[in-house]
Amino acid sequence: MASNITFSDEEGDVPDTWEDIEICSDAPETKKDCAEKNVKHSGSLKDSVDDSDDSDDSADSDDAYEHISRDTTQDEEKNQSSLTTIQEPWDENAFSNVNNLICDIRVTYVNLMNDFVESELFIIDGDSLLIEVLSTPSLDFEIGGQFLQLIYLAERFLQSFTQRGGLFEIVFFRCMESVWYGHPSMLLARQLLITHLKMNTKFSVRTIFKDWYERNWLDYLHDKRPAFIMVSDGDTKVCFGETDTSVRFMCQSLILHSIGINMNVAYPSEMKCTVTKLFGYYIESHNYNNIAISEKVKGRKTILVDVLKDVLKDRKKNECNELHSETNVKENDQLLQRVISLYLGNEDKRNDFTHSIRTVLTLAACVDVVAKKCRDSSTSDELIPVYYDLAYVYFVHAMLMSYLPLQVRAQNLSAYSSTVHSSDSSHWKTLSKFIQEIQLSIYQLLQLDAIKSLDETNSVTDIMDGRLLHRIVLQLLQDNTLQGVHQRGLQLPESISETVSSLWKLILNCIDQRDQATETQLSKSGVIDDYNQSSPSTVQDSSSSTGADFPEECIEGLIPIQCDLVERFAGDVMESVPRLNIDNDEVQRFLVSGHDFDEKYHWHSGKPLADDYDNTKDTSFLSLLPKDPASRKKQLKDKQKLARHMQRYGESLHGKLYGVQQETIIVQKNAHGQSKTKHSESKKTAAMREKNLKDKEESNKKTALSKWKYIEQGNFKSLMEDEKYDLALQDINGFISNCSSGNLPVQALFKKLECSWLAWKHQNTQKKVTKRVWQSIEGGLYYPVQIFDTVQNLLENHGNDITKQDRKTMADYILKLGFQDMAEMVLNSERGKDATNTKSLDTESVDDKYAIKDMSSAHFQMNFMGHLMKRDVRSDPDPRVNTFIPDTWQRELLDAVDNNDSAVIVAPTSSGKTFASFYCMRKILKADNDGIVVYVAPTKALVNQVAAEVSARFKKDLPGGKCLYGTFTRDYRKDTLNSQILVTVPQCLEILLLSPRRQKWTDQIRYIIFDEVHCLGGEIGAEVWEHLLVTIPCPFLALSATIRNPKDLQSWLQRAQSFRKQLDEEQGIRKRLNSYEVKLVVYQERYADLKKSIYLPTGKSMEECFVPLHPVAVLSWKQFSEKGFPSDMAFSSNESLALYNLMERAWKDSANPPEQLKTLCPSRYFHNKLFITRNESRAYEQDVKKELVRWLVTPEGTLKAKQIIQLLQRKPRGEIKKHEERNKLADPEMMIGTSFMRFLQQLKEQDKLPVLVFSFNRKFCETLTYVITRLFEAKEKKIKMAYKSTERGKKAAVLQKSQQKVAKRKRDKKTNPTGPDGDDVDGNEESAVEYDDMALLDDNEVLNDCTFASMGTHTKEDLHKVMSRVRFDQSTQSIKLQRACRRGIAYHHAGLGAKWRAAIETLFRSKFLGIVVATGTLALGIHMPCKTVVFAGDSVYLDAIQYRQMSGRAGRRGFDPVGNVIFFGLPRPKIERLIVSNVPHLKGNFPISVTLVLRLMLLVSNADIRKDALGKALSLLKHPFLCQDHPEMMSQIKHYFLFSIEYLIRKGLLDTKGVPQGLAGLATHLHYHEPANFALVTFLRSGAFHRLCKRDAGEDKFSEDVMRNLVALLANLFGRSWIQAGRTIHRSSSMVILEPLSPPLLKTLDKHNREVESVFDLYIKSMAEELSIQRQPTCLPLSGIEFPSTDTTNISAHMAIHNTTETDVNLCQETTCAGDVTNSDGTYPVHDNLGSTPGKDGDVTNATGPYSVQDTMSGSGASERTGCNWLEAELQKTCNHYKAVSVFTALSGITDENLNVSSGDMLQCLRQGIYLEDDNIPILSHRLEDKKGRRMELNAYALDFFKHGSATTLMKENGLQSGEVYDKLKDFCMTIKAICVAMEALGPEDKDDEVVLAFKQLREEYSNKFREQYGGNWE
């Protein structure tokens, strides 16, 4: 029967919501029925969407659908025809077109928990969660369903978020329920999931929304402001086959709607979890392409409604119409209440431990199904007794579920698979039909209110077990005892036998009350006979098929190895793992030596290879100087140029421009450690030196005095007379900043007071604000602020030099401004040397015209002087620092360096933490000529900067061959091993530390400095930082501004240092005089405040464009009410005052305002405070925050606090909303581009240049730069052409020619003093052309109005020198950049050449460039001080850490008092999230890989200093950061280490003594590329490369086909980038999809993968064996619900009690039923849960009652199992045996045999306690499918580029971003080079090898293509 849908359109023909859709559900239909349904469709969604008429006759459609007949096929067909006619435009193509739109959406694979962790919640669509769980291959839902495993998988999925700090709510839309009609098990699964999440967890689960169009849903989103919604795309295979079309359509509709309302979307499928991260596909709603897609269906709800109706109408119409009918609900409610009443009144129930919600539902469902069948007149008499029997068996199965351990319920049905899945067997159809009816009945009962009256809710998670039910039926069929079983009963354990009998009687009584069944009906058994006749006569003993946990071909055990490292690290674990006999022939076949390969191809695979250091390009020129004199001279000249460049580059950082002079370092100790003694200077020399100092001081005083006279009597006086006060103040400020002698600064300050007062009077008289005042931070009160600041300067810095009259003068100025209280404090403050009694202030003469009214001095200071408030700094100098007075925390750093201690330093950007690094360098340089300091920077840009700064700061004469500094990156190296200061990146330092040949060099390292150490928690390369921090042989400094848990980091590093100390003491080594102590220094105060605002280009005025953001305005009420203020949210002083003003206003009309609020009035709070300091302002801020939070304890205070937050949010949100309404369809990048010039001009007018504009899109950075350049050039051209056409321009042109002639005569006169006629040349002819005229006439001259450039601190000569390195670069990119630099703008990203990057950085620091548009390359430590930072456009990579790093560039200490942060083109929720969210905690990663193990073995076996190398390896292995919080992981790390060793031995890369052999050098040489490096070794040994690389006869080079085939093979190995399945492919020049390997190569790769699988399958088994001594946890991971379990002993004893055979007992003893336990506390994590098993919302739960182990396996419960129970004994015999599989997964018949490390869902199958990541297994899959069953293909970018050489084409067709293209191609080039270098070393020496020659040719050809595209010498 059809579902009834009624739809009332309240607002016209096009409804806005689905609020009035009422769905009466259908009956279930079989899969076959679903497959046979196929509605004919035509039309197109695209055409329909473009149609302007939105009515679509929806009313007629609804009427037609509503009157579909429920009883006859004829009526159904009639309405089918009617509806098809009406719905014709929106049928089949609606599905396909919506799906196509989804495929066109741009998705990004990102870390979902990076940006949103602990900041804001996100939403999980409940039906998407259900789809994700049902798509798990290991879940058996075909024969009744495994609901407990389904709940377990759902909790596992949610746990992946809760473990990583995720906050979420789950939403089930009621309209989604209808799409599951036709699948009763799905309906029940959905309702069980909802019930379980609501009853048994503390998650917020919402089911109130009918659909995603209703207003309540939009209000909910507005209130919660979720970061994203997680929705399945619906195209996932679920357990019953392909996802239903309606499910996919509805999910995709929700996605499109979410994007349309600016809600980001994440896909739950294909998520990948690591220890600390969770990666998934993410859709940015603001992406223009996605916005355009969503607009096609946005608002077209009628399309979706009609299609849904069509889908629901197409269901089978039988019983589902009664699911929600009023009669049916009433009957079910009465039935349930009666069953509950009878059940609770049953006396036997009191002793029944099975009291549960499942028991009640089982009773009611059995009564409901059997009674309905009896009442149905169409039911045959033979079928009724069958239903009674099945109901009894089902009831018994439900009772056994509370009794049997989970291990026993893991039944093996493989022997009956053909019978169970047979569609021809009538009895299985009957059983399937019965189960569906039971499921529908339970589904209806669960929705009744009566069910809530039951106290026990845990058992709802385990409502039925389909496999157990089928196993019982099969056993009864085998014994011919199914017929009449409801009358005869079964032999059950005594503990439940009486209860079952009593409750079965209750069922019969209830059935009799609903329907009087006759005995005649119950005695008929026709169908039962069919059951028995068709049942299998024998049952195969399934236990025989489960005897082995792993395939028999796997030799279980480890090959013995003798190695100190292995024994010292994993010796305890190695003893517990079986070992193999090395002499065994089966073992010998695993040992590969590689000799056959060497002999066949004459290679030397065991030859030691040069490491990555040797293979990196050397730019030092020391060993590569050519013999040719000309070439040698050129290289030496280039070296000199580089030295000069580094000097200039360093000076631009902290050199002469900033008053820092280069320091000459003199070694303080000689070779014997004795201090050098300086010759004492003579008295004459000392006297001369003193006289010179005095003379210089007198000269400076005279110079300063003459300057002051000139200013006072000349320029300053004239400017004052002309009322040019701003220029006068500029001159005065310039003099004050450069003068420090005598009384002149005091005189200048009083002149500044006078000038500021006159300017203030002039401003008030003229009623006009000057441009300087308007641009200032203070706005219209600029001059009063200058008066306050000047008075503060005089009193605090020159208090001893001012007189009584001076003090009176200052007080008068303050009084004139209207601040009498402050004037009195100035007058009566501490006086100077001639102080006497003062007179009172003359208040009568004060002119109110110039006074600032309604504001106290405290209000004024808090509102306008926050940036000028005095910081509490120390005044006592530190002799160790000459350039400034360090703060206390900075002195702690110096003390740590002096004591040779290590330190972790966490301080904000620009706070001054880096200076400790240079102090450390100075110390080591002064100590001797041998000690080394290593500076580790995260990026090459920072490496270059630090190296240049070292060059500018220090100068030292070193012995021959040694240098002051060196660099080492993957691209180049310079003086790496012969320098005292090495600046490098983490990966390169790891190469040196783990290289056996560099141990003597590492022994000389005295200090290592880690800059930006928070990269330890990054997504790429984090493990390298971790390796370095625990292997370094010396003290270190770890610097960062964004570490949230520094104490955890410090304690972890302290343990590693303590272990290092222990090793040194064992070996008798005392290499360093440090205490092995790691200190922690934390400083949280930022020097300059950051003012945040949002730029809206639609604003008409400046005020409308720049919308200020108060920090409180970004807080949601939920965040504030639950958590208060974020710990790192700081206010400026005026923001604190603004919040107080609102708080005061909120209680203005109240009779009882809070007493504490009164004390927060600034006048009262700062009473008797002359000038407010920064610390006092911070204290006021904290008190205001505490007061507002305190209001939350009362209802009235809560209401007022909410009103305050709403008031602060009103303006920014209102303005943003207006802007979004005007630009709802605008491409954000296009909007930024079109308004970028206006934006920059406005910043210039506000004096907010220089500015850094950040965007994560390289192409967009370049585009913005070129747009401004072209606009300025066009403007300038227009101005000059207009000028030349004027009379003035024409006259100027004539005069210009005359001037040029004069200039020529002057040049001629230098060579010929007289003219042609002997007359002197007149050189005094005046030019009538002014400079501006010259600029207008000169096409090469840049007009001031057409550039953002200024000379800044550079002269033209300086600029010429900076640009000299790039002047001769004539590439297109360089020419465009040179044009842009002339306009004061440039871009900066990693794809730009090093020379250009350095030039742009230097020009920006010198203030020549006003704007730099950059990617994140400038975020990490690059010194680029600016006034303003702009975030232009959003990106998924813009997270909390990046935001803090980037915004820290603004307002740097010593440069600007205030920094500005402007958001341009970012969605409001993202802006608020960035400001509010905290940086994530640093967490560890899985520390080792197979390649790292090989590198450690190579280090230990071949190191120069083996004891030290062993110590490094042990320190790395024994101190993973992961074990800081999860010490239980150490055992798994040891197991992984041992089996990595086993794999390397079997691979022939290690021998049995742990010594690397064969091609181990090649594998470690490519350590960046695991697992491709091991696959390469396999292909090389198999001869694949030799067969591929064949030259044609007589040819010197290989053919193009050979080269392409070689690239294709390498791309399959090293250029692996998977394309998301389903993505639309647009081909033209590119293949896009990489062609698969040839069959022979695939065969080789498959063999390689099988070798990996065989070893790591053993790893899983080994971990399971270790955990088998403990009972495997049987509690759910989040809710903590416990289920019955048992152990090996109990199973054996249990079976013996029931008279099983000796064979059966032995079998169970040998292959146990997963008798594992957890930790002592009864908990253990799932494979990605590394902590305790939490209960509700994280609490550890050990539930008791019907699900506790104690009730089922101990005490009286065990003794009650005596007696004959043949059913239980049979179940014991046929249960599966497993160790590695989870007890919940085993319920679906999965055993250890089904586990395979290459399978996609293996991680979900593993038992709790076994941790494994995909990246840990070195399998190189050539075939990959997503969970939708769609094959994923490799991107052919590497091969495509080799074919056409166009990066633009790769971006357009291969779907790669510009920066991604550069990085991937460069990495591929470097890989080819690395392989080529290695093969040249390993190949035959006496002849040319084809493979070596082929790789040489490929390296040359691929490198040439890369150079042609990107230019430069990348090698």
Image: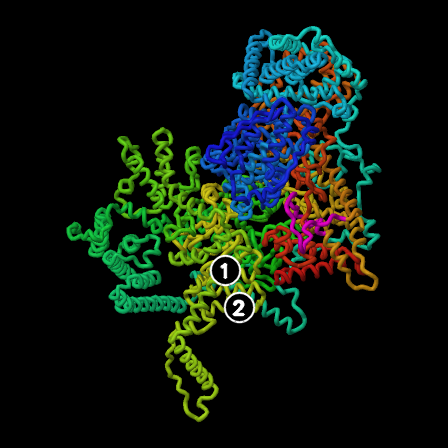
The mark that comes first in sequence, 1 or 2, is: 1
- In the rendered image, which quarter contains the C terminus? bottom right
- Is residue 1231 positioned above or below 277 on the image? below
Name the residue nearer the viewer: 355 or 1856: 1856
| Foreground label between 1 and 2 | 1
Residue 3: mark:
none
**SS label for mark 1:** helix
| Image quadrant assignment for residue 440 | top right
Q: Count every numbered label the image shows and give the total.
A: 2
Q: Which residue is mark 2?
A: 1364
Residue tagged by mark 1? Answer: 1267
Give the left or right position of residue 714, taking residue 227 as reference.
left
Write down the region rendered in magenta.
1610-1637
Q: Position of residue 1559 (x, y in %)?
A: 75, 49
In the image, residue 1043 lies in the stretch drawn in magenta: no
Q: Residue, x 72% and y 59% (percent of image)?
A: 1898
Quarter of the picture holding the N terminus: top right
Residue 180: image quadrant is top right
Occupied quadrant, residue 614: bottom right
